[in-house]
Amino acid sequence: MSTPTELKFSKSHEWVKEEGDVMVIGLTDFAQSELGDLVFVNLPEEGDEVEAGEAFGDVESVKAVSDVFSPVSGEVCEINEDLLDNPAAINEDAYGAWLIKVKNVTDTEELMDAAEYDKFCESEK
Amino acid sequence: MEKKTVLYDKHVAANGKMVPFAGYILPVQYEQGVIAEHMAVRNGVGMFDVSHMGEIMCKGPDALKNVNHLMTNSYDGMYDGQARYTTMCNEHGGTVDDFIVYRIHEDEFMLVPNAANKDKDYKWILEHQIGDVTFTDVSEKYAQIAVQGPKAKDVILKMVDPEMIPKKYYSANFNAKVAGIDCILSRTGYTGELGYEIYLPVEHAEEMWDAFLENGKEEGLIPCGLGARDTLRMEAAMPLYGHEMTDDISPLETGLDFCVKMDKEEFVGKEAMEKNPSTKTRMGLKITGRGIAREHMDVYIGDEKVGQTTSGSHFPFMGGAYAMAILDKKHAEVGTEVEVEIRGKRVTAEIMPLPIYDRKKR
């Protein structure tokens, strides 16, 4: 799978897509591959505040719990409820299975573009 | 510095995800992943490298006396090749490790400790041995391969004279020949399925591994890693040292009464256990709320803490989150609704009997 070029990427392996004023956040393909079969997802609620660089939820594989970090600060305006019953969707299509949408974005971490992210992943292997 | 088992190259060649475990580098999973590997063992057959486990030989006129002294179980009245599971306790009644102990002859036994504890165990045994006996740590000489699942027998029948297969569960043939290789063929396992554990000289391990891969193709045999090993043993309610028992947890607190023979004249830890009868027991928990309970999470009824989980996960065959917990006996009734504190959040669960998975009830 090639890394989508319209997205931006964090060092903790989240992707960000701009949809107007709203930031859509998910986990990258590299992340899902490292995590293994996902069996559970813990998401915040609509209206919750998230902060750039801080965990907003976690995903669980059979073996471990992993925090998911927000690349932006703002307010959660939508969560992907499908993931609550079907966490494996993240493994099947990491760039399609978004986790949360954030509005009123006040701060953003330094993010990489697709090419920089690919290089970053190579160095992590 | 972690060690490699003799099968390390095989795991790397099969794209195993290598992780440190008990002082060794072993695969936590291969390409198909933990869930697929778990289900292969439940529905077909899977193969594990368990060469990291220890083997300690016990030989001499006082061999039987020693195993009865060191271990909580009784080793009287056994036939050659028979095995019994046991704990080895300290003077406070806590657990040093759990073992499978085989009687080879009346004056010779093989003890199989956990990989993580084998050096500690050997030291303990040397410090507590009595009379005329010799204990030898032969772990470096042996590799061990486990083949588990309803189709395990179909596979092994292609590789061994049927007469050589032990007739009973928890017994071994110390003079078996599988795939032309001299080995110890044991009908034991850590998965809750039918299967075998094969102890063999390290020089032949790769050959045996390949022989199983070849002969198991038809049955869909795949190598399985530590991840599946853990979920399988949890489903079958098999204890893991460091979780269900520790230095401070007695076998009597964790439902292992069956391997503690209080009518033996003596064994290390007996006095302490007599003075402190257990007020706890181990039960299963079905997580009914949203969350996955794992080890060392507190269990509540209302505001009262009634115990702690010892192991837990998403159980692939059962299709949900379950756990094992050590609970106060007075609150341990099946059907009781409790709450487990999962990373700061209370999640409902229901007490159920063990084992959570029972292959006989499928």
Image: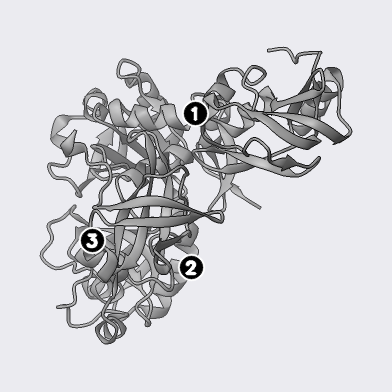
| Mark linked to residue B333 | 3
> Residue A111 at x, y = what percent?
86, 29
The crowding category of the residue bearing disc 2, from other C-alpha atoms within 10 Å (few below 14, some 14 to 19, many at least 20), is few
Chain ID at mark 2: B
Disc number lying in front (2 or 3): 3
In this picture, is A72 found above or below A6? below
Residue B204 shows in the view: no
Q: Earlier in the sequence, mark 3 or mark 1?
A: 1
Q: Which residue is mark 2?
A: B120
- The kind of residue on which mark 1 rests is Gly
Residue A87: percent from the left, percent from the top? 52, 28
Closest to the observer, B360 or A11: A11
The chain letter for the residue carrying disc 1 is B
B338 and B12: which is toward the camera: B338
* Residue to which mark 1 is pinned: B33
The answer for how far apart the CA atoms under marks 3 and 1 are is 36 Å
Of the residues under marks 2 and 3, which one precedes in the sequence? 2
Label 1's element?
loop
Instruction: Classify mark 3: residues with Cα within 10 Å, few (<14), some (14-19) or many (20+).
Output: some
Q: How far apart are the alpha carbons under marks 1 and 2?
A: 33 Å
Chain containing mark 3:
B
- Percent coordinates x, y for residue A71 in the rendering: 79, 34
Q: Within the image, what quadrant is residue A99 found in?
A: top right
